[in-house]
Image: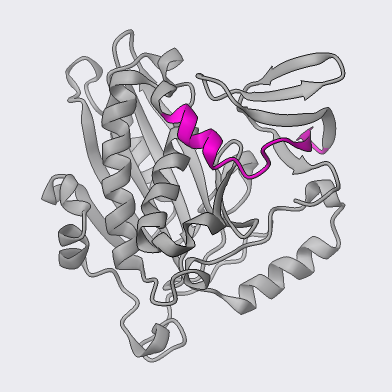
Amino acid sequence: MTDTLFPPPSPGSAANLDGADWRIDEQRARAGGASAIPSDALEIVDETTSTNTDLMARMKALPRERAAVGVHAVRAAYSQTAGRGRQGRSWQATPGHALTFSLACVLPRPLAGLAGLSLATGVAVIDALARLAPSEAGRLALKWPNDVLLDGRKLAGILIETAWSTANASAAVIGVGINVRRDEALEAQLEAAAASMPAQARATPPAALSQAVPEANLTDTLAVVVKALTEMTERFGAQGFAPFVGRWNACHAYANQEVVLIDKGVEFARGIATGVDSSGQLLLSTDAGMQAIATGDVSLRLADGAP
């Protein structure tokens, strides 16, 4: 993916969607669910390099043995000059069209106890978005390890980073990017770029929440997702990924379909995706038997070449 950057829109521009102000209404966000975090924990800025980078630096500076368990900060930015996703890909978004934010938290678990956190985050995000459009929930699905899909296209991405870990706790930053409103110009740019790539290197084409929820906006999306993530971190901190396994498998986009796993552009595994286990590993039924694939810098594709 290219590193195309978009300047903040001026008043009256297309990003003032349907004539409404595209900026986040912090008071309404808190009333809608963001009140699950302390009032001073929510930060909204016009531009930064990366909300994950910002909060990683902050969490690394905490006194590890005295750091309080729970959410420490939620930082949203309308524009990120170095936003990123998995595998070093840049995250492209036009201000007013995408919600990009990070949540920093301390979990009462050592590093090994964080297995499955990205998948639990996916469950929290998909359930939150489903609450915005209950009648459209069946169009939402999860792609292993950390994408939320709408009609088979990428609606949201997740990036988990660990700032530090001790024997009793870990500081993590959960980055979330959600396409809230369609950006047809950016979609066309991405499609043109993908056309020149081999099928295995192409990213999943984008979708936007407004395709399921016409009135979708940044404020209400932030409110429900922050509430869901706060509840998820509390439950994950106490029980790990195990309570989320059933829900993740129920939302599995490629359940019982043949998939290929790709590492650095090279296929290294192929089989039927049967689901995930209690640590978030993908269970792959192959000619050699069942394989458990750990999350990492790998890509999953349907065997027919579709992203």
State the residue in front, 49 or 289: 289
Outermost residue toward the front in this view: 135
| Vertical placement of residue 63 versus 118, above or below | above
Residue 177 in the image, given as x and y percentages of width and height: 47, 54
Residue at screen point 31% across, 45% down: 228
Q: Residue furthest left?
A: 39
> Does any portion of residue 196 appear in the rendered image?
yes
The picture quadrant where one finds residue 76 is: bottom left
Tell me where residue 35 appears, x and y as whole percent.
15, 51
9 horizontally vs 149: left or right: left
Q: Residue at x 50, y 19 (%)?
A: 278
Q: On screen, 200 above or below 211?
A: above
Q: Position of residue 188 (x, y in %)?
A: 70, 74
Give the colouring mode of the picture.
one colour
Q: Position of residue 68 (x, y in %)?
A: 17, 25
Q: Give the range drawn in magenta.
A: 244-265
Residue 298 magenta-highlighted: no
- Give the answer, above or below, for where 122 lies relative to 217: above
- Is 45 situated above or below 250? below
Is 162 situated left or right of 167 in this image? Answer: right
Residue 261 covered by magenta stretch:
yes
Picture residue at 38% right of the left edge, 76% below the top: 215
Query: In the displayed image of the protein, which residue is found farthest to the top?
Result: 167
Considering depth in this image, is 152 or 99 the residue closer to the camera? 152
Which residue is painted at 48% across and 66% down in the image? 209
